[in-house]
Amino acid sequence: MLKQQLQLKLAQKLSPQQIQLMKLIQLPTLDFEQKLQNELEENPALESGKEESQQEDNFDQEYDDSNELIDTQDIDIDAYLSDDEIPSYRLNTNNYSADEEEKTTPLSGGVSFHETLKLQIGSLILTEEEKIIAEFIIGSIDESGYLRRSLDDLVDDLAFTQGIMVEKEKIENVLEKVQSIDPAGVGARNLQECLALQLERKEASLATIVAKKIIFETFDLFSKKHFKKMLDKFDIDESLFKEGLLEIEKLNPKPGGAMSGIFQNTHIVPDFILTIENGEIQVNVNRRNAPELHVSAGYQEMLKGYKAASTKSKAQKEAVQFIKQKLDAAQWFIDAIQQRRQTLQLTIEAIVNHQYGYFLTGDERALKPMILKDIADKIKMDISTVSRVANSKYIDTPYGTKLLKTFFSESLTNTEGEEVSTLEIKKILRTLIEEEDKKKPLADNALSKGLQEKGYKVARRTVTKYREQMNFPVARLRKEL
């Protein structure tokens, strides 16, 4: 039986403009510059540089979502041509002088990792079919340099996507040729094969012979660092065994990572600039390559012509509606950029004030516990907004360029009842691990006791969590001969 009923529901939804503003806030400087450039290219009503005319325009921000053609009475041309009010974005100045402008050397574009591998195919002796297979194999190699797909999967993929029916043995033959290109170890299907491929290219010596025996015959024992069992198996001198291990340590477990890093733009452009003058901290948003934006004077002239026309055709009405949409979008983008800058400035000032002792001295022991809510409460904004700023922004300081999110940490209470940052505890934990006896590395229980001796009561499971966050393996895997 069907029933009708009324239901009240309270919901909060973000407008498309608010969503885009959140995305703008999240963008780091380089991506923000690209977004500016894209917007200038896509919206002809948005222009950069100083305006030739001093006339300022106040735009009606209302959008008409109707699909019907708007009548001339529905478009308030005077609202677009009024000069009674100066937009807020023109009341803000850039206080940077020409001498203070952030200068960075641009990096030229390079060749990607996969393109570099494909370029080397020309040096291999391959048939046309094998060349297609080789390129397909390279396309399946990940950024670390490994072939993650099985040969059976490659057989199916070649049949479906390239229309090439081949046996698995032929793909394996082509793969062996691909594995002969640089960097050594590329195209391996697992770590053991990756290390073996690199050892095959090394000059023959007693150390490399031992290294090969370790990788080919006792890789499982080696991965678990059971050195005593390996020594008993090989029955060789311990010093020679160490030389073999040293040869393995020189190998690259991620051959693709080193090469891709050369060609990818890893240059960091800081989003904030912090300086110290006469004992006072100054911090500002990096406005590198941020042009002064304004709406197009040409579009304003079109509106004037439309208003002055005695008769208005359907084509003119369509044109003025298009102009209205572009002008609205341009004005919104200008306002959004201003709001983004204000949000970033408020956030960074709150962070610097909270961590003033650190930014003044550079001493990590001066870092205070700080969570997103602390900053959100200070600037009276949502936690998600602070998170967007902190997760992707860098600050240039006299002590180096730092990622903002690294200054956020929870608090723990030491034996004296004082609240300390978890960053301070991690620093001490790192020191304990780095200074341990590598023949008998400290287990997490021992590390917990070491922290307690220094006045920090930290449970073993918490030590485990911090150790993993700092990318230290368990004690067994930190063991050295």
Image (cartoon, rainbow, N blue to C red):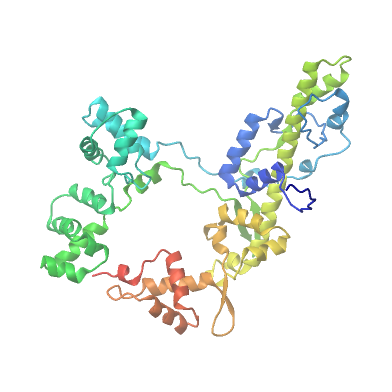
Left/right of residue 425 with respect to residue 84 in the rendered view: left
From this view, report whether residue 283 is shown above or below residue 88: below
Kindly give the residue lying farthest to the front in the view shown.
1
Q: Is residue 261 visible?
A: yes
Q: State which quadrant residue 357 falls in.
A: bottom right
Left/right of residue 332 with respect to residue 392 in the rendered view: right
In depth, the one of 398 and 246 nearer the eye is 246
In depth, the one of 223 and 185 nearer the eye is 223
Where is residue 77? Give x, y as percent: 85, 27
Q: State which quadrant residue 337 falls in.
A: top right
Where is residue 305? Give x, y as percent: 83, 19
Q: State which quadrant residue 115 falls in.
A: top left
Where is residue 467? Give x, y as percent: 43, 69
From this view, report whether residue 336 is shown above or below residue 347: above
Where is residue 390? Give x, y as percent: 59, 56
From this view, report whether residue 84 is shown above or below residue 447: above
Q: Is residue 278 visible?
A: no
